[in-house]
Amino acid sequence: MITSFDQLDLTKQYTYADYLKWQFKERLELIKGHIYEMSPAPSSQHQTAVMNISGMIWTQLKDTRCRVFPAPFDVRLPITDKKSNQEITTVLQPDICVICDLGKIDDRGCLGAPDLVIEVLSPGNTSSEMSQKFTIYEESGVREYWIVYPEYGHVNIFLLNELGKFVGQHPKINGEILQSAVFPGLSIDLSEVFVY
């Protein structure tokens, strides 16, 4: 049994079945079997943005079939069609995700791609990590992906096209309204997000 992060071999590849056996406090993600330790405590700017966005989404979608989940919430993204725990090598904890197919939600989180994923960046996020997540969200079929930059007050938006590739949209900045393309009734007033 693994009870300490130090017991893990960071050069080894792991599966979701391994992940379920770990019993320690550190938060981590699996990206194609490789371990990425998450920042211990996000900044107040980060948490304010997450809470403000989550609250607005929940308010606007609460009467629909869709559900909003802030981190920590495991999103298991199998790359193959097979769904056993042994074959899942990617487990992410997006800052916010919206899931409308309730069949994907279980006691352990979400199995399959959310409809909307929102990552709020912190200084600890590396460009390599963000590049890998972009590719994984695209490959797994996330329909809309927002990357929020609290420090600069803007959001980059990507939509999945019919070829399964993300297409960047015009960025939204503090003071503008971000209108979701996947959820026509969902709009976020960014002047109410970047309030510190």
Image (cartoon, rainbow, N blue to C red):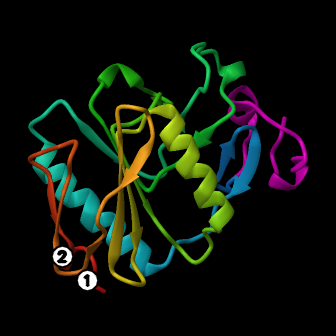
3D distance between C-alphas at marks 2 and 1: 6 Å
Q: Is residue 107 magenta?
A: no
What type is the residue that disc 1 sits on?
Answer: Val
At x 59%, y 26%, the residue is 78
Q: Is residue 100 above or below residue 56?
A: above
Please name the predominant secondary structure of the magenta segment in the image.
loop
Question: Where on the picture, by quarter, is residue 125?
Answer: bottom right
At x 63%, y 15%, the residue is 84
x, y percent for residue 147: 41, 62
The residue tagged 1 is 195
What type is the residue that disc 2 sits on?
Answer: Glu
Asked whether the beta carbons under mark 2 and mark 1 sit within 8 Å of each other, the answer is: yes
At x 49%, y 41%, the residue is 138
Q: Is residue 7 magenta?
A: yes
Q: Is residue 144 above or below residue 195?
A: above
x, y percent for residue 124: 62, 73
The residue tagged 2 is 192
* Magenta segment boundaries in residue numbering: 1-24
